[in-house]
Image (cartoon, rainbow, N blue to C red):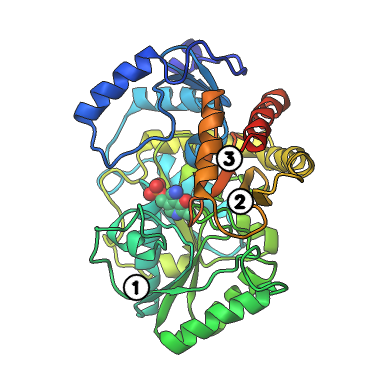
Amino acid sequence: MATDSAPATVLEQRRALRTPVPGPRSIALGARRAAAVAAGVSSTLPVYVARASGAVIEDVDGNVFVDLGSGIAVTSVGASAPEVAAAVAAQALDFTHTCFMISPYEEYVAVCEALARLTPGDHAKRSVLVNSGAEAVENAVKIARRATGREAVLVLDHAYHGRTNLTMAMTARAMPYKTGFGPFAGEVYRVPASYPLRDPEGMTGEQAARRAIDVAERQVGADQVAAIVVEPILGEGGFVVPAPGFLPTLAAWAKDKGIVLVADEVQTGFARTGAMFACDHEGVVPDLIALAKGIAGGLPLGAVTGRAELLDAVHAGGLGGTFGGNPIACAAALASIDLYERTDLVGAARAIEDRVVPRLTASLADVGAVAEIRGRGAMLALELVRPGTLEPDKAAAQRVAAACAAQGVLVLTCGTWGNVLRLLPPLVIGDELLDDALTVLEDALRSL
Ligand code: PMP
């Protein structure tokens, strides 16, 4: 069996630059890419990957980068975690695909059992497995509409939910996600989010929620609303942690009005924020939760988990898809979930927050471009502005990310204005490697 014979490559967890970035092999691949890959697909790093392991990525020229992105919050258990790689190899030898809608298998059922156990709330739950985060969000909306018989969907300002037609409609930012791609799905209504740095000073979470509820009740009508879809921490919108009380107030209102509360935990889920799910920080129990990214250690898998009566309101055949819950992805999910629990990756995410936030808060106190250091667990961000103002500085974020890349540290940006640096290291990153990457980041910010 592959499990015994082929341990995954384990790279030394150390940054190393052997050529300028990008090196000659990456430059050659870039030329092939330009002639074959659609220009609409862009990449952050100009290098091509040869191997990845734990919290490092090795490129085709032998440069080794510290990964502070985890493939956008996916490889939380580490890149090519040996346990995940072994599960994938073993499952591939048994069977690669049958389609759960045709001939089902245990791995799908086991993932759904694990999701019922791990997600917030101890009510009866069901799950459906899909291929991506966008597909999970779309299915959550389908389920909420079918179960309530209502059509309207509320979403937050700064939201990101995906690139399909419905999830583009639900996403806030036009460029690059929506511009030129309409018309978009209807019955989607946007309400204000809680954004403590940019809200009126002193606004509480409850006040921010009331502001959103007021818009919804005036412009849509609560009895028309099937679902309110929230990211418990705004992801692509800038890693914005809502003021305490925002989510609980929205949840209480939704419950009162018969509105399905959907938590989009595609980016925040699976230990990332120092809790298994970000809703747990405020004891919020969503009716449906959309999951993907970190669920399967790098394999494509998404899920909707939630109240049994909602999921089971959908007629037989109303949910599914050819690849949804692919057995290899399910095997990877089961191995990843075992790692989250057995190796306490929730604790690891908290330890990363404890290591990063006090250090950067002290070391960057006099860097005027840093308006705020925020986030939870290993979902951390720095919002950059023109010093002395709240004016977003996208160019500064891009300069810092590029300077880090040139020194072998992969840092992603995000934010409605593109002015936020985000840190999403694999939760298994070692202290020494993390410290080294932070030094590079600090130097880049200082030289702004
Ligand atoms: N929801 C959230 C909160 C996300 O962060 C993302 C991806 N960045 C998505 C949905 C879409 O996921 P996918 O790219 O897997 O479709």
Label 2 CB, ligand 1: below 8 Å? no
User: Reading the chain from its start, which is encountered first: label 1 or label 3?
Assistant: 1
Quadrant occupied by the C terminus: top right
Disc 1: which residue: 146
Q: For the residues carrying marks 1 and 3, which lies nearer the camera in this image?
A: 3
Please tell me whether residue 194 is drawn above or below residue 334 in the rendered image: below
Disc 2: which residue: 383
The type of residue carrying mark 2 is: Glu
Residue 252 visible to the viewer: no
Q: Residue at x 70, y 74 (%)?
A: 204
Q: CA distance from mark 2 to mark 3?
A: 15 Å
**At which x and y percent is residue 189?**
40, 75
The type of residue carrying mark 1 is: Arg
User: Reading the chain from its start, which is encountered first: label 2 or label 3?
Assistant: 2
Please tell me how crowded label 2 is: few (under 14), some (14-19), or many (20+) other residues with Cα within 10 Å.
many
Q: For the residues carrying marks 2 and 1, which lies nearer the camera in this image?
A: 2
> 269 left or right of 34?
right
Disc 3: which residue: 424
Front position in the image: 268 or 414: 414
Q: Secondary structure at mark 3?
A: loop
User: Reading the chain from its start, which is encountered first: label 2 or label 1?
Assistant: 1
Residue 170 visible to the viewer: yes
Q: For the residues carrying marks 2 and 3, which lies nearer the camera in this image?
A: 2
Q: Residue at x 36, y 26 (%)?
A: 92
**At which x and y percent is residue 162?**
38, 54
